Amino acid sequence: MFADSSGRCCFLIFNVLSLIILQEGLHTVEGVWPLPQSLISSPEQYRLNPQAFYFRYGRQSAAQPGCSVLDSAFKRYFSLVFPDFTSGYGDLGNSAGKPFNVEISVDQDDCEGYPNENSSERYNLTVSSGNASLNAETVWGALRGLETFSQLVYQDDFGSYFVNKTEVEDFPRFQFRAILLDTSRHYLPVRTILKTLDAMAYSKFNVFHWHIVDDPSFPYQSRTFPDLSSKGAFHPMTHIYTQSDVRRVISHGRLRGIRILPEFDSPGHTKSWGNGQPGLLTPCYSGSKPSGTFGPVNPALPSTYEFMAGLFKEVSSVFPDSYIHLGGDEVNFSCWKSNPDVRAFMLKMGFGADFTKLEAYYMENIVNITSSLNKTSIVWQDVFDYHEKIPKDTVLHIWKGLPAQYYKELSRITKAGMRVLLAAPWYINHISYGQDWRTYYTVQPLNFNGTEEQKKLVIGGEVCMWGEYVDATNLTPRLWPRASAAAERLWSDEKQTSNVNMAFPRLQDFRCKLLRRGIQAEPLFVGHCKHEYQGI
């Protein structure tokens, strides 16, 4: 309503409006983030009494008490809905409230399973006098509905809790909505990863891409090859992820409807691997003699593939998700070129001097290994550049370039019938002064030249937080709420969320919710939150 003829809105007006909302304690029920597909709210409000508030299973629900996902969620969301009641702060003032039930019904009993690429997250939520009804196809959809309900509840200045009469019909625009954390360049403690998973659930992200190892360190503690971490981690005791740690992350994610997708990137980005696996990396030569340095994984040796088969067999048993990320990016050929044994192998294979064919050969073998373990491979877009005959079920991950380039890549790769993920516009480890979240928010993943069938091959997107300059001290404020801008782009309807200025006050409000939930989200602009110091 503040737009001019060109569609631009008055940024200053919205900043002032958002400050008024925050300072005066006013509530906008539209302040759900990410915005549901359909939300109809009424000024009619209902007072909630924490002592007479219940999450209940519907009588016809396929899931009943004992469902691990929902039982855990009910406890968690009670604390999120009533933070003052559970923390002991504030004037509760709710004793006069009437009983209120939130009845949850799901069509499928998938309580003990894991979310997967086909899991429905659709839900319907109705809030009326004395009760709310949440219906979903799966427990994962029920989790998304519980998150929405928790954001609809608000407090007045006296500490009383209210929710308005509301109707929500909701589902994600894209099925794959991910956050990447890099735990090789800086080790991230498990508690930091778990807190990130919490924040991901608040923004309805559903995939944690764990870039767990890379050149600087190998913190994953392998049962099969224990020397990889004992000799490749920053410290063999304090800077590793034990099998117990990994199980804890997977369990924490599952209870929040988040898939855990591991990445073991090769043949490049493997310097730390060589410390614990002699003979894996390619010896580099200076003239006719070894230089004492090493390059990418050696693709010419049978022992390489025996090792990889053993490692990925273990990884496939540890990580239940059907996807695995194999990397394949930024391979420097100079060491391969210098090595006489590698060159001899290339001549034997008929590759000539084309080292892209050698890399294609390597990746084809690795993809075959993971395929035999019933895993779907994700690789960085580099693999498609030199190996266009990779299996059709492989997912290509676009990470390069400005919009003109990545839109071109989207068109080119989907034209070949390949599924794609878009990460290029959401490398938010890069920072700049000002509100760079606006750039992330205005990305349109399907705004490329292609048919409707091509656009269906874009399965989602990913926010990447690479770790060169990020560790546990600055991860959370650098990630949130900037990542939430991409979350709404990947969840919500494009037409309803096309105006960045209309989104600003809602994101301001959501950032305050994150602070109250103990997530140290950085400010978007001038202002303050009523509860900004609680839990921090």
Image (cartoon, grey):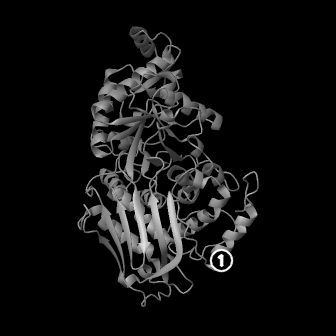
Judged left or right of residue 143, residue 516 is: right
Q: Secondary structure at mark 1?
A: helix
Residue at 46 percent across and 17 percent down: it is: 357
Q: Is residue 227 above or below residue 296?
A: below
Q: Nearer the viewer, residue 494 or 268?
A: 494
Q: Nearer the viewer, residue 316 or 217?
A: 316
Q: Where's the N terminus, which quadrant?
A: bottom right
Q: Provide residue 286's location: percent of width, then percent of height.
A: 53, 18
Q: Quadrant of residue 49?
A: bottom left
Q: Provide residue 198's location: percent of width, then percent of height.
A: 44, 61
Q: Which residue is mark 1?
A: 23
Q: Quadrant of residue 297?
A: top left
Q: Provide residue 119's location: percent of width, then percent of height.
A: 35, 49
Residue at 43 percent across and 90 percent down: it is: 96
Q: Is residue 164 above or below residue 8?
A: below
Q: Nearer the viewer, residue 164 or 419?
A: 164
Judged left or right of residue 144, residue 286 is: right
Res. 256 in view: no
Q: How many marks?
A: 1
Res. 97 in view: yes
Q: Amino acid at mark 1?
A: Gln
How dense is the environment of label 1, judged by Cα within 10 Å: few (below 14), some, or many (20 and up)?
few
Residue at 60 percent across and 31 percent down: it is: 408
Q: Provide residue 186's location: percent of width, then percent of height.
A: 50, 49
